[in-house]
Amino acid sequence: MSGELAFISCVVNGVRQELHVRTEEMLIDVLRDRLALTGTKLSCDLATCGACSVLMDGKPAASCATFAWQADGADIRTIEGLTAADGTLDPVQQAFVDNSAFQCGYCTPGMIVLARTLLDRDPNPDRAAIRNWMGANICRCTGYEMIIEAVEKAASMVRADAE
Amino acid sequence: MNEISPRLKIVGADLPRKDAVPKTTGTAMYTVDVSFPGMLHAKVLRSPHAHARIVSIDASAARDMPGVHAVVTRDDLEGLNPTYGYFIKDQPVVAIDKVRYIGDTVAAIAAETELQAVAALERIIVEYALLPVVATVEEAMADTAPELFEDEPMGVVPAYGQGASGARRIGRNNCYRFSYETGDAALFDACDHVFEDRFVFSRDQHFHLEPFVSVARMDNDVIEVWTSCQNPFPLRKELARVFQYPENLIRVQVPYIGAGYGAKNNCKTEPIAILLARKSGRPVRFCMTTEEIFLTQCQHAAILDVRTGVMADGTFVARSGRIWLDSGAYSDASPLVAEKAGYRLPGPYRWQHLDIDCDCILTNTTPAGPYRGFGGTQAAWASESQIDIIARALGRDPLDLRLQNLKSLGEAYVPGESGVDSDLRAGLNLVADRIGYAGRASGDGRGMGLSIGFKDAGGVNKPAQARIRITTSGAVYLECGTVEIGQGVHTAMSQIVAELLNTELDRVRYPALNTDYTPFDQGTNASSAMVVMAQAVQQASLEAKRKVLEFAAAELDCEVQEIELDDWSIRKGNESHPLPPMIMRHYGGTGYEFTGEGFFKPAMDHAAPLETQCVSWEFGWGAAEVDVDTETGLVRLIQLVVSGDAGRAINPLVCRGQDEGSAVMGLTGALFPCMVYDGAKLMNGNGLDYRVPLSTDIPDGFVSILQEQGYGPGPFGAKSLGEGCMLPVASAIANAIEDATGVRIRELPLTPERVLAAIDQAGK
């Protein structure tokens, strides 16, 4: 069905987007090429590594394996959408900064999005829960320990904000 | 531990990385993000055959496909030097006479979309005449094996010093041999025991998440290429040779790099992107898929025969080694990796005789190239495994035997070499104590093992240049060619500058590399930044500072010794004189820039085996505890303790990340399947089938300990870091497996099948 267009309407980082997309077009291509949200990164292209993770209705989704038309009606947040309009970082972003929980940074947007979805579900995860949750994404640089510690720290920041 | 200057305020602090906000908010720019109006997308046709002669290529139908702007085959190489490589120029931009592995590049197309390019590739008709295939080192060395190269490709053997030599084409499919010899071979005869073991090393793929990618365009007569490359200046030189084009009309730009681990050296996507850009007159982006990176570069598989003579009291005497590296289809960095694997095989121990040959053997598989550890990983696997074999045969504890034979601080590695710049015993005792080695209960599937990873760091004969510019308002440019590939070098190098100029870290900016402006550098590799480039940066900073102080002293009519630079003011006793008004008074209201130049290169020294003495020795001490399921052969890692010596940690958090990241990378070669071949066909070359460690694969008992022994040659005593901790991992685990089960595994990876087979064999 290549070449057919579908009309989609979705919210991306709080902004309503209405687009015609080709039926074979992937969500990551819409985000990167048409909405200029290049923070989301393509790597394995098989929904395995998690570098392309975005929040879709609050759940982590591999944007490399999500057709653009599947985003119709969805609320999508990318790494860019986690930062407040005034530049204030999300607690997960701030914890990654404070703990230097990244190296090359290519997996980092996906890791931060993934961690965000964990904290949305469980603001008080123990280390084992974090290790297990973060096991969905690949980082080849850090050895993961500093990422896990950053998520622990982000959780404590989220809890402190809630109090 | 050494006492280190306590007056530092920025060096040694865990300051947030300079790339922290861009990388956590999605605004960091990588080559994958580079885009130009009218940019085309390249895709390449890859060989389905491991070894074949190309009879004909007909690309005419492809040229008429929708969206296609340019097609390149062997018929489009007129006017080029169409092959590239490090020492040996054997890899063609696109296949010319033959294809030599499954995935070899045959043709390339630039189209308006990647899909159009892929569709057009299918219209290229290639007729192949199949040739016999050599998939392994053993097959490639056989008397009847076909040569991958019938004629000798253009190339050179680098110069070597005392005891070292290189040679080309001395056997079938042998593209290079490195040899090192010292001492009297007859010493073997005097040894009480001689141990001979064969070790086998599998090959990992770097699996850098940002693929090989570049964007090329013509800017009038300038070839501009944006690329994810860790050695842009040698790349520029190679592109100038390939395209027969002036170096100063080639501009290489390197934004943030999504990791490389060695893979992103030299030509990858760039020649094809440039060729297509020239043909089409449009910017061309060539971004490989993950499947393609598996067909472009990998680590060297290896066979290592190690013969070691020792005395009954455990004294090491003599070691000889034969190493065969699987180079894959093209020589790439194999000669350099051979040099390092051979030179590092002795490990940091005292020997009276050494005799090592390391051969690079071409096979019809993915070309092997630089990979973190660079031959040291293969050497440490064999060397550190055999030391435990020797210890057990002599009834000695492996820790004690190592402590007995390790070199002391300052002791020359081999005749003519520099002295080791870490206390090796201190490092080994540290990891042994931390893991609880002394009180361990060995056996019943549970055991511990130790290992020391070792490499000569800082590159060989590597020059570095750096420039500091300070504006009227005190804003600092740090211009040097070390690229930010994830290791945190923008931060660490800027901390050094801020410390030396007595200013805040925020004042220092480290612009991304552009070969038009950035001072020359040989490349971001060999753990060289903190010991080679940092010395140039230090010198540039001090020169800029000296000029500022001399200027201020003249303005204030005093001696330089009377004043200090203090956050872009001049402090003279209890007076503070801001520099900006002073500068504008002298140079005019539009201001001025102070500059400082820095240069470092180790001295040529023919007494040193590699013609310059090693700048710094990098170590990774490792200790592993395993629980082996003797029913299934599954090795469960309970503890992994690693430690590197930063000399002086410029940013301890960044150092920790390097040590932990490299250790987990070492786990891949130890416990994961690595690249699995069926003959010459790679079976798991994609992101789904290829397993790299996940957070869930890391035990809670994974710990890194950062040492700062203070003996490094870099600024403030800094040493090389970032590769050491991957080197001991596989052998520490294998040694732990023997401690746990009594079974010695000599072949990587340590898969359940292999461990179980060894246990079953031992039980018979």
Image: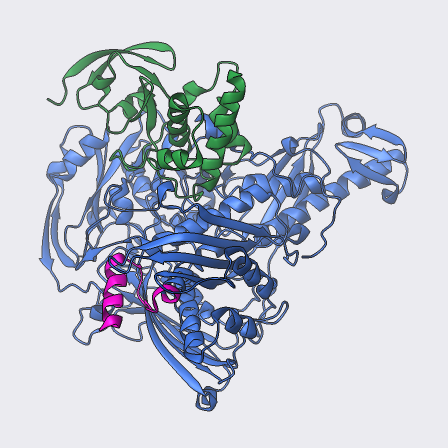
Q: In which quadrant of the rendered view does residue B596 lie?
A: top right
- Front-most of residues B158 and B352: B352
Q: Position of residue A160 (x, y in %)?
A: 54, 21
- Front-most of residues B674 and B465: B674
Let me know if residue B194 is in the magenta part.
no
- Front-most of residues B25 and B566: B25
> Chain A in the picture: what colour?
green
Answer yes or no: is residue B756 visible: yes
Q: In which quadrant of the rendered view does residue B689 lie?
A: top left
Q: Position of residue B198 (x, y in %)?
A: 32, 73
Task: Judge from the rendering whether residue B432 lies leftward or rightward of residue B169; answer left or right.
Answer: right
* Residue at image point 53% right, 52% down: B721
Answer yes or no: is residue B216 visible: no
Rendered position, B378 above or below B466: below
- Front-most of residues B172 and B24: B24
* Residue at image point 51% right, 16% down: A162
Q: Position of residue B304 (x, y in %)?
A: 34, 71
Q: Position of residue A123 (x, y in %)?
A: 44, 23
Quadrant the C terminus of chain B occupies? bottom left
Rendered position, B25 above or below B757: above
Let me know if residue B750 is in the magenta part.
yes
Q: How was the colour assigned to the protein in this rendering?
A: by chain
Rendered position, B306 above or below B10: below
* Tag count: 0
Quadrant the N terminus of chain B occupies? bottom right
Task: Judge from the rendering whether residue B182 lies leftward or rightward of residue A21; answer left or right.
Answer: right
> Chain B in the picture: what colour?
blue
Numbered range of the magenta stretch: B738-764
